[in-house]
Image (tube, rainbow, N blue to C red):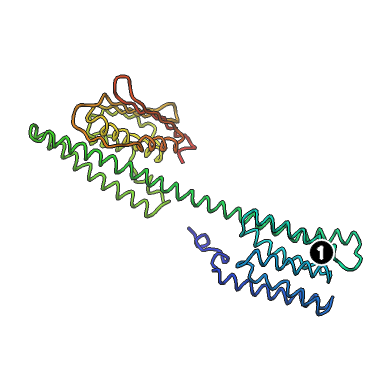
Amino acid sequence: MGDGESRPLVARRLRDGQWHGVDTVAAVLLALAFGASETRSGGWGAGAVAAVVWLPVAVRRRWSVPVLYTVLAGATFAMAFTGWEESWVPVGAALYTVAAREPRRRSATALGCSLGAVAAAMALVPRPVPASEVAWGVVFASLMMTLPWLVGTALREQRSYAELAARQAVTDERLRIARELHDVVAHHLTVIAVRAEVARAVASTNPHEAERTLALVGTAGRTALTEMRRMLGVLRSPGDGAELGSAPGLADLPALADRAGPRVALSVDPDPPLPPGVELAVYRIVQEALTNVVRHAGSADCRVNLSRIGPEAVEIEVVNDAPSRLPSLRPGGGHGLIGMRERAAMCGGTLSAGPLATGGFRVHARLPFGSRTAQ
């Protein structure tokens, strides 16, 4: 990021207290300028009224609505008894603040009251005024109020949208972290728990099988630590592409199948190579599907097929046989299928899952990897 992009604008550097100081200085200067101008054309009384109308603008950020109605009353008085048309300019400044800071209904009420004050002031002008001058005065006053109000309203809507987008980004990031934690931790802990139960069950009758199973437990534990370190590294430096660059992909599927626990027949057609994001989605979907096999079907045989569908799509199929009779740990679940569907949807694909008539279970996903999804 360049220096010009990382450095905030001057307006964003000012604190609230500094903005109050800017408002105070601006209000005093404008009061002196308009007061002096009106004094030359209308006398000291008119100049004093012009100056006083501007002074409340100094605290418009603290009490936006009271300041508006105070300035509006002063401007109405100035217009009705001195004919000072520029009295509506400070009303516009106050209306901008109300529109930018207050809720929509309160802001609209303030605009309506301000426009009503214009009609009242024109009706109270003591000297005869030509109709053309009255019309011009109404148009000028309406513009001095409506335009700042529209700008303030647009600013408020922009801020509301930015806050909503920021909250949505936080929610999306929390879901991403939860999905990664579930995929990384749940799979390996499920394998560890199930294989530990198997090792305990066969330790006295088949020490060799128990030793092999405990080796799988150790491998799963080390892999879980490695993936947790990778994920923490991504979270510490988000947005730099580390997730896709170091994330597991098709090349890691054989190792995943070997240490899953059940016998897995793996068939992968990786040509052409998939985009990194799609490879990660494929790996995580297969990983979660194998986790569900270990959790719900013990060491039942399982088949994983990965194949192309045309030039821009890949199909994943994970099918397991009926649940085995070996001891297994079967904790409650529910988030696994949701996470797989979310990953498929993120790639613009679809996923279906359900039991088979033979007693097994099938997970099927189709992920496109064309130019739109490869980014």
User: Callout 1 environment at 10 Å: few (<14), some (14 to 19), or many (20+)?
Assistant: many
From this view, report whether residue 49 is shown above or below residue 64: below
Left or right, 146 with respect to 158, comes to right
Disc 1 marks a residue whose amino acid type is Ala
Q: Which residue is drawn at 55% across and 53% down?
A: 162
Residue 79: % across, % down: 81, 68
Residue 60: % across, % down: 64, 67
The foreground one among 271 and 140 is 140
Residue 27: % across, % down: 68, 73
Is label 1 in a helix, a strand or a loop?
helix
Residue labelled with disc 1: 121
Left or right, 24 with respect to 271, comes to right
**Residue 279 falls in which quadrant of the image?**
top left
Residue 333: % across, % down: 32, 37
**Residue 76 falls in which quadrant of the image?**
bottom right
Q: Which residue is drawn at 68% across and 76% down?
A: 28
